Image (cartoon, rainbow, N blue to C red):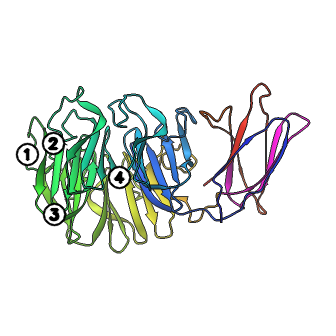
């Protein structure tokens, strides 16, 4: 059955009746957390975003939605999206045709469009053959179907791995090939990068002040290396980067870490940096994620574990004290994790989305801008409805009235914009459908302009 995510209506002196086929919403399948914004991918291939939008990183055509952000998930692309990655103030996604798209901050050329201008709408960067994407703080990595590694953006510490640190004044605004073949996985930290080759070897480049490259030093090339160097020869299967720390899994399910440990994010029971990889968990780890100063991982039983900084409640244990050893947060049922700067996201087996930690930019997507949530809160329940029946009428009073039957208990938001060429959707009203689902929303149009309206559901 067809699901309509939003409805756009242009009306002044008219009566409109729109019948929308109702269906249950899609479950969340993939998540990515940036510094202060979040990206969600649903099972219908639609892309959703929430949080800070100061640089247009949400891709909704604005940079001033709700004082630069939105605290509820909003749909950005209706379908065909297969992967997402969130950087410091920019976003990346792939479509099912292998094309790479980007939006947001571009001060270092991280969008790869040949300019240094930010974009508040998605723009295509590569037309096809892209298979994997990763976002650092200000740089981008991607893989093509031939196993080649490409990069663009900030290179002040050699994180692009092209042998320079002065390409375009420490940056490049066009994709450049770094490795010709055999690369299978990538991860971007704040100023360093990791990748895997098909022989299971781990390679690293970039900033190494805290030992995050894992080569046993902190002074390689004045704290960095601008060419890939091999760190582990084989058996590595999964990689992740935090701010100044790195994580990887081996084929036996063991978790290994290196780099900054000032907040206990390595989980080794100390607060000492590790210049070489050290094993933290011996087996059964299936997924990893690194935030600024905290770390998340999953075990094969679906349990979620965390360690490191907890000042914003990002560990989700109900407290604000950090820990330098792994602690279990959720006992079972977790399938995917993402770590932002000071917040965390995870998915459960039913497709529900959960979040905890810093929320000052609305990045948790709970409809508030509360400072933080120290325990996991449900953001999107499985099958959240996203479609409605709508009736619009211009009243004698000059007000525009929308009445519709939604899903009982679901929140619906009325937004308005003055054009569709470059829409700036301004929230007008939020109402919750009562028992029976009937909702009435009334707003006054501006007779000097053509008003466009949309109704969207919100968790």
Question: Looking at the image, is mark 4 or mark 2 nearer the viewer?
Answer: 4
In the displayed image of the protein, which residue is found farthest to the bottom? 301
Taking the spot 23% from the left edge, 25% from the top edge, the residue there is 169
Q: Position of residue 351 (x, y in %)?
A: 50, 66
Quarter holding the N terminus is bottom right
Q: CA distance from mark 3 to mark 1?
A: 25 Å
Against 434, is 168 above or below? above
Check whether the beta carbons of the residues at disc 2 and disc 1 lie within 8 A of each other: yes
Q: Please state the horizontal and vertical placement of residue 166, each as a whole percent of the image.
A: 19, 28
Q: Nearer the viewer, mark 3 or mark 1?
A: 3
User: Which residue is under mark 2?
Assistant: 208
Residue on which the image places disc 1: 217
Query: Could you tell which of marks 1 and 4 lies nearer the N-terminus?
Result: 4
Q: Residues within 10 Å of mark 2 (few under 14, many from 20)?
A: many
Residue 396 among magenta residues: yes
Estimate how packed mark 3 is, as few (under 14), some (14 to 19) or many (20 or more) residues with alpha carbons within 10 Å.
some
List x then y, in percent, for residue 41.
48, 56
Could you tell me which residue is drawn at 41 percent across and 39 percent down? 90
Q: Which residue is mark 3?
A: 199
Determine contact: label 4, label 2, CB under 8 Å: no
Q: Which residue corresponds to the image point at 68% horizontal and 51% vertical from the top-left?
A: 412
Q: Pick whichever, 319 or 409, lies toward us.
A: 409
Per the rendered image, the range of residues in magenta is 387-415
């Amino acid at each position: 059955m067809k699901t309509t995510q939003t409805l756009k209506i242009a009306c002044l002196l008219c009566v409109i009746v729109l019948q929308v086929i109702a269906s249950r919403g899609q479950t969340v399948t993939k998540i990515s957390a940036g510094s202060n914004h979040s990206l969600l991918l649903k099972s219908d291939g639609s892309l959703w975003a929430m949080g800070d939008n100061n640089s247009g990183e949400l891709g909704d055509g604005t940079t001033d939605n709700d004082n630069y952000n939105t605290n509820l998930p909003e749909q950005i692309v209706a379908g065909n999206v297969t992967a997402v990655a969130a950087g410091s103030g920019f976003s990346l996604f792939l479509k099912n045709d292998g094309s790479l798209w980007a939006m947001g901050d571009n001060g270092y050329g991280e969008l790869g469009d040949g300019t240094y201008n930010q974009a508040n709408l998605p723009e295509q960067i590569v037309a096809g053959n892209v298979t994997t994407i990763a976002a650092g703080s200000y740089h981008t990595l991607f893989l093509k179907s031939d196993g080649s590694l490409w990069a663009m953006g900030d290179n002040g510490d050699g994180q692009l791995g092209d042998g320079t640190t002065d390409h375009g004044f420490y940056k490049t605004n066009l994709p450049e090939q770094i490795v010709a073949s055999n690369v299978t996985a990538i991860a971007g930290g704040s100023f360093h990068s990791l990748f895997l080759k098909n022989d299971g070897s781990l390679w690293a480049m970039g900033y190494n002040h805290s030992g995050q490259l894992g080569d046993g030093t902190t002074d390689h090339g004045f704290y960095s290396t601008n060419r890939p160097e091999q760190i582990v020869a084989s058996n590595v299967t999964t990689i992740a980067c935090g701010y100044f720390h790195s994580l990887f899994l081996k084929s036996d399910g063991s978790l290994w870490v290196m780099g900054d440990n000032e907040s206990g994010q390595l989980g080794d029971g100390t607060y000492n940096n590790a210049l070489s990889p050290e094993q933290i968990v011996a087996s059964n780890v299936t997924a990893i994620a690194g935030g600024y100063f905290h770390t998340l991982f999953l075990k094969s039983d679906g349990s979620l574990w965390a360690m490191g900084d907890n000042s914003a409640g990002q560990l989700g244990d109900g407290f604000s004290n950090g820990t330098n050893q792994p602690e279990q947060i959720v006992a079972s049922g977790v399938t995917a994790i993402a770590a932002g700067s000071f917040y965390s996201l995870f998915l459960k087996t039913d497709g529900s989305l959960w979040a905890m930690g810093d929320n000052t930019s609305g990045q948790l997507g709970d409809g508030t801008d509360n400072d933080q949530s120290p325990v996991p809160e449900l953001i999107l329940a499985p099958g959240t409805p996203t479609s409605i029946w709508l009736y619009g009428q211009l009243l004698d009073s000059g007000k525009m009235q929308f009445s519709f039957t939604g899903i009982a208990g679901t929140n619906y938001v009325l937004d308005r914009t003055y054009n569709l060429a470059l829409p700036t959707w301004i929230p007008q009203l939020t109402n919750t459908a009562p028992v029976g689902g009937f909702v009435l929303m009334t707003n006054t149009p501006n007779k000097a302009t053509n008003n466009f309206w949309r109704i969207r559901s919100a968790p």
